[in-house]
Image (spheres, helix red, strand yellow):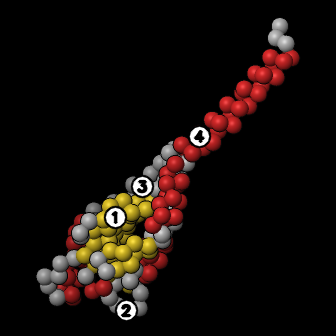
Amino acid sequence: MPSSGSLKSARRCVGLCLCIALPIVVVIVFWPTIYAFGWHLRYGAESSFKGKVVPIPLGWTVLSADESKLTLIRQPRSIFSRGPYEFITFQTTVARTSSSEAFSNWQRSMAFLYKVPEYEVIGPERVDDSAQSFCITIFSARWKRAGQMSCWLENGAWQAEFLGKRADMAQFRTLIRAFR
């Protein structure tokens, strides 16, 4: 039969192990959220890209930036979070035609890509009062919680794409309006 001293010692040891292990487990489980928070502390809430300022919402980070495209990713809350994963891209376009012809081509390509009955296509809808920026929203019957937005910005000089949760589409619209 163990003595009361050895039981106290064992309890102390278990308590110490829990005090050390619990924070480590919490950091591991919530690493994506901690990473996103640290990213924002280091880089701030916006990114410059090709002479434009792109707001970076909290929880999002820059995944990649090259000469033609800036890609943002929404970090999951924990290592156990499940999709849909969310991405936003901004890219410049090469205007080879007039802006009205480019706009018509963009509309036709979106209608062609998502012509099957499985998709519900809404738009184009005006992003702001300038009549220079529009978005088309695409929903799939199979993925109820997810959606896609394709945006034609500044008379076609820029394109922006969103792929992710329907609930975050309003945040993307706000981001598009703040794009300057």
- Asked whether, in this view, residue 68 is left or right of residue 74, the answer is left
Q: Earlier in the sequence, mark 3 or mark 4?
A: 4
Alpha-carbon span between mark 1 and mark 2 = 25 Å
Disc on res. 8: none
Alpha-carbon span between mark 4 and mark 2 = 51 Å
Q: Earlier in the sequence, mark 1 or mark 2?
A: 1
In the displayed orientation, state which residue is furthest to the right. Answer: 4
Residue behind mark 3: 85
Q: Residue at x 72, y 26 (%)?
A: 13
* Quadrant assignment, res 87: bottom left
Q: Name the residue type under label 3.
A: Tyr
Residue behind mark 4: 24
Query: Looking at the image, is 19 positioned above or below residue 176?
Result: above
Residue behind mark 2: 130
Q: Are marks 4 and 1 in contact (CB under 8 Å)?
A: no
Q: Are marks 3 and 4 in contact (CB under 8 Å)?
A: no
State the image coordinates of residue 8 (x, y, percent, origin top left).
Answer: 82, 23
State the image coordinates of residue 100 (x, y, percent, origin top left).
Answer: 21, 88
Q: Earlier in the sequence, mark 4 or mark 1?
A: 4
Q: Name the residue type under label 4.
A: Ile
Residue behind mark 1: 71
In the displayed orientation, state which residue is furthest to the top. Answer: 1
In the displayed orientation, state which residue is furthest to the bottom. Answer: 130
Q: Are marks 1 and 2 in contact (CB under 8 Å)?
A: no
Q: Earlier in the sequence, mark 2 or mark 3?
A: 3
